[in-house]
Image: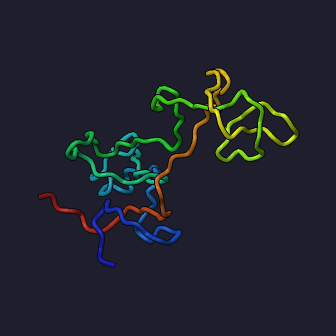
Amino acid sequence: MSEPFIAEIRIFGFNFAPRGWAFCNGQLLPVAQNTALFSLVGTTYGGDGRTTFGLPNLQGRAPMHPGRGPGLTARRLGQSGGTETVTLTEAQMPAHTHKMSCNSNDANSQSAAGGFLATEIGPAQMYATTGAASMASDAVGTTGGGQAHTNPQPFLSVNFCIALMGLYPPRS
């Protein structure tokens, strides 16, 4: 492996940070022991800037380039965003109805396929095969409890690590 630049972030497919690297897990490091790294990242990812500074936290996150692409929202270095769970409200769903068809005649079928709810005439006959009508709007209730659901993009778990030592990157 070539010698990294200080503060370079790489992805590793094993469960430990190699010598000279640290996990990008948001931990705080002492400025006095990591002056070169601090001079590059500063307090972008946390810390007080006098005694400590933070490493990026890429746990459960996808990295994103700072700046503004065509048609995209501007993002600054170190900014985090997004959410891991989403709760949809009625206002966020497109307008729609839940129509349920029925028949006021006696049932003549045991099968729901192609049938409509009807007046039950026997222990197993609940459907009519002709004569659809709409049920009253209050006959079909609402459902759901308003809880959030997880919303992750497809993923593969790997470790992001940042170089604590190496070549100091020249500025252009």
Q: Could you tell me residue 20's position as x and y percent?
A: 40, 68
Depth order, front residue of 157/85: 85
Q: Residue furthest bottom?
A: 1
Residue 136, x across and y down, in percent: 64, 21
For the residue pair 17 and 157, the one nearer the viewer reads as 157
In this view, the residue in front, 140 or 104, is: 104
Kindly indicate the quadrant of the structure image that contains residue 129.
Answer: top right
Determine the residue located farthest toward the right in the rendered image. Answer: 123
The quadrant in which the C terminus is found is bottom left
What residue is drawn where x is 27% and y is 48%?
66
Left or right of 155 on screen, residue 75: left
Q: Residue at x 58, y 31 (%)?
A: 99
Q: Is residue 8 shown above or below 73?
A: below
Q: Is residue 39 left or right of residue 157?
A: left
Residue pictured at 68% horizontal, 37% vertical: 116
Q: Position of residue 98 (x, y in %)?
A: 57, 31
User: Which residue occupies 31% across, 50% down?
Assistant: 41
**Is residue 1 visible from the viewing direction of this image?**
yes
Residue 162: image location, x then y, percent: 38, 61
User: Can residue 29 be seen at all in this image of the molecule?
Assistant: no
Q: Is residue 17 left or right of residue 119?
A: left
